[in-house]
Amino acid sequence: MKPNNRLLQWARPEIVALKPYQSAREEFVDDGRKMILLDANENPFDNGVNRYPDPMQKKLKQRLAEAKGVNKEQIYLGNGSDEVLNQLMIAFATPGKDEAIILPPTFGMYQVCADINGVKTIEVPLTKEFQLDVPAILAAQNKRTKMIFIPSPNNPTGNCFAVEDIQQLLEKFNGLVVVDEAYVEFAEDQSILPQLSDYDNLVVVQTFSKAQGLAGVRLGMCFGDPIIIDLMNKVKAPYNINVLTQELVIKRLDEQGHVHKQVHQIRLEKERLVQEIISISFVKNIYPSNANFFLAKVDNSSKRYKQLIERGIVVRNPSKNLNCANTLRITVGTPQENNALISALRTMESE
Ligand SMILES: Cc1ncc(COP(=O)(O)O)c(C=O)c1O
């Protein structure tokens, strides 16, 4: 019998039918008593991390649900959003058969995930203003298109996409609309997360790697319909979020005042950097950015990239991306790092 929910129809049939691995800590229902744990073949001597982590990250999800205004059942957590993106593909796209839409210039991991999973990508370029070409996207969709990846703010261009365009896709696109909000904290009031319960096909991905300052900890979040979250839980490794990550992220949730101050400072520094860098003779343009980085058009990106490396500064040269010829992607650093960048660029003007 075919499942009658459209999300289940889109999902890979073998994943819908999958009986997931049942880990030791999932079988036992914790009623709050102090128990002797002889169920998971661990070393019994306490060192803080000798026990497996909670496989479903209940405490962390409870905190995130409160912080984000969603239900616990709408949250899946991965080892960085990179893992979340891969899990989405595993759950929904059949290797060798299904397709995903990507929007160049875009974040490189979508193509890598597709290649790993044997999923074909359909490329629908952004407009010249780096916005969504909604009619072209809808025209590119066919029966095998399972998802579209929309990073907003976009990487490498830095801009947000028009919310009305994303809404149009949510209404008309017959598949998952994955809005990757890795940089959303830098883009005031632009998150689509408050609309999560309005659209069954909306998947929002966020991360603790960027504004939250925990790139080394690896925590990616996926918010979506509980049916999507159930499918992702089925395909995840049993203990994919380690004890230290769960603890550090909970601690970070108590420090949001501090994070807001840092985000504010980074935004001010970005404005200062843009003002300074636009006056450098070989900088032709700086594209509007809602993120903690910006794309600068220069005379010769390979030459300028190498000159910066010689001066001990690493930026990104995304020039191979569509419509990004001769650009450098520059992340906003500390005030001292930004001063060093400005000085280095000035010394390069005569070369
Ligand atoms: C748009 C976008 N999504 C996802 C990621 C990956 O983030 P994470 O560190 O959570 O895997 C990045 C990192 O550069 C990104 O730019």
Image (cartoon, helix red, strand yellow):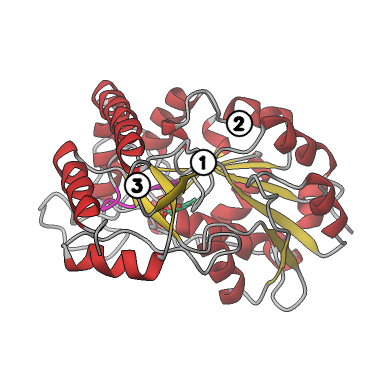
Instruction: Check the image and report above or below for 137 versus 161.
Output: below
Instruction: Check the image and report above or below for 181 versus 19.
Output: above
Q: Name the residue type under label 2.
A: Ile
Question: What stretch of residues is rendered in magenta?
Answer: 215-220
Name of the residue lying farthest toward the front: 350
Q: Which residue is mark 3?
A: 209
Say if mark 2 contacts mark 1, CB within 8 Å: yes
Q: CA distance from mark 2 to mark 1?
A: 9 Å
Visible residue check, residue 204:
yes
> Which residue does the image show at 78% across and 56% down from the upper left?
10
Q: Does the closest atom of ligand 1 sit within 8 Å of the Cβ of label 3?
A: yes
Q: Name the residue type under label 1.
A: Glu
- Tell me if mark 3 has few (under 14), some (14-19) or many (20+) residues whose alpha carbon lies within 10 angstroms of its own: some
Q: Which residue is mark 1?
A: 181
> Which residue does the image show at 22% across and 49% down from the upper left?
341
Name the secondary structure under disc 1: loop
Give the left or right position of residue 74, taking residue 261 as reference. Answer: right
